Image (tube, rainbow, N blue to C red):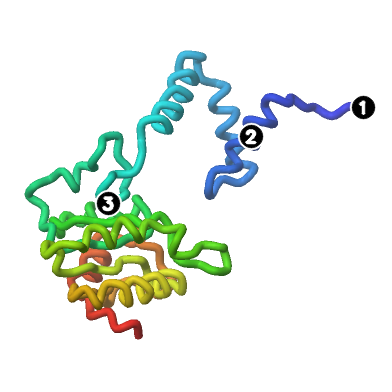
């Protein structure tokens, strides 16, 4: 006897499975939920995804996501432009902004150096960061790349590039456990880590 199979449904489940953190069971629930919605709602959902993909791009200054030429942070004239916090991904900016403690600017690398995964400095937005340092405005760069092997490797690499420019390079202090992702830390821990930042000597 032939098994029950609906190709279109299977393909929908497979697409949801491709999302990070979504297993087969969760993908099935999402697929069936989408099918239970009115067609207008599913169309709205699909249109929103397509619109976001078309309109959202990198800020030409900090490489964060934006739907304009410059993101809201870079466009904010009240920001302290003497400090740049370097992070792995856009979600890390949101995590720091939630603390409401730091009125600074950011730079998003969109990844970390990881030779094992084929990610080299050339794959990251390092060139754009260095371009921002070609003036006397920036006084300190804070490495918030995370206390992981890849985060430390990226921080040490950037430290060697930035230090000769006469700019202070620091990294997050006590508060974040080794191996932690910034996006999963609470606001108090993140704020404490930035406030307790220390000089980046590569050690």
Residue 36 vs 56, above or below: the answer is above
Q: Position of residue 2 (x, y in %)?
A: 88, 27
- Image quadrant where residue 197 sits: bottom left
- Residues 116 and 97: in front is 116
Left or right: 84 in relation to 87:
left
Q: Secondary structure at mark 2?
A: helix
Write down the residue under mark 2: 13
Residue farthest right in this picture:
1
The residue lying at 19 percent from left, 56 percent from top is 105
Sequence-first tag of 1 and 3? 1
Q: Residues within 10 Å of mark 3 (few under 14, many from 20)?
A: many
Pair 3/2: label in front: 3
Residue 111 has which mark? Answer: none
Q: Secondary structure at mark 3?
A: loop
Residue farthest left in this picture:
78
Quarter holding the N terminus? top right
Residue 161 vs 56, above or below: the answer is below
Write down the residue under mark 3: 62
Give the tally of numbered discs.
3
Q: How many angstroms separate mark 3 from mark 2 (CA)?
A: 36 Å
Write down the residue under mark 1: 1
Q: Position of residue 77 (x, y in %)?
A: 8, 47
Q: Residues within 10 Å of mark 1 (few under 14, many from 20)?
A: few
Q: Secondary structure at mark 1?
A: loop
Q: Position of residue 182 (x, y in %)?
A: 35, 62
The residue lying at 57 percent from left, 22 percent from top is 35
- Residues 22 and 70: in front is 70
């Amino acid at each position: 006897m032939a098994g029950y199979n609906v190709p279109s449904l299977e393909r929908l489940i497979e697409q949801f499975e491709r999302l990070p953190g979504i297993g087969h069971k969760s993908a099935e629930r999402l697929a069936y939920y989408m099918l239970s919605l009115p067609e207008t709602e599913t169309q709205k959902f699909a249109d929103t995804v397509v619109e976001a993909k078309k309109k959202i791009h990198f800020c030409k200054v900090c490489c964060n996501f934006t739907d304009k030429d410059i993101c809201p942070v870079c466009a904010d004239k009240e920001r302290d432009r003497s400090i740049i916090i370097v992070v792995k991904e856009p979600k890390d900016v949101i995590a720091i902004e939630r603390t409401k403690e730091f009125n600074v600017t950011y730079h998003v690398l969109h990844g970390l150096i990881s030779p094992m995964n084929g990610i080299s400095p050339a794959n990251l937005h390092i060139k754009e960061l260095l371009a921002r340092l070609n003036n006397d405005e920036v006084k300190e760069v804070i490495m918030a790349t995370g206390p992981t092997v890849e985060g430390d490797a990226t921080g040490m690499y950037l430290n060697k590039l930035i230090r000769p420019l006469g700019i202070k390079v620091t990294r997050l202090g006590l508060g974040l456990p080794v191996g932690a992702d910034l996006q999963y830390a609470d606001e108090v821990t993140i704020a404490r880590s930035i406030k307790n930042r220390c000089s980046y000597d590569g050690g």
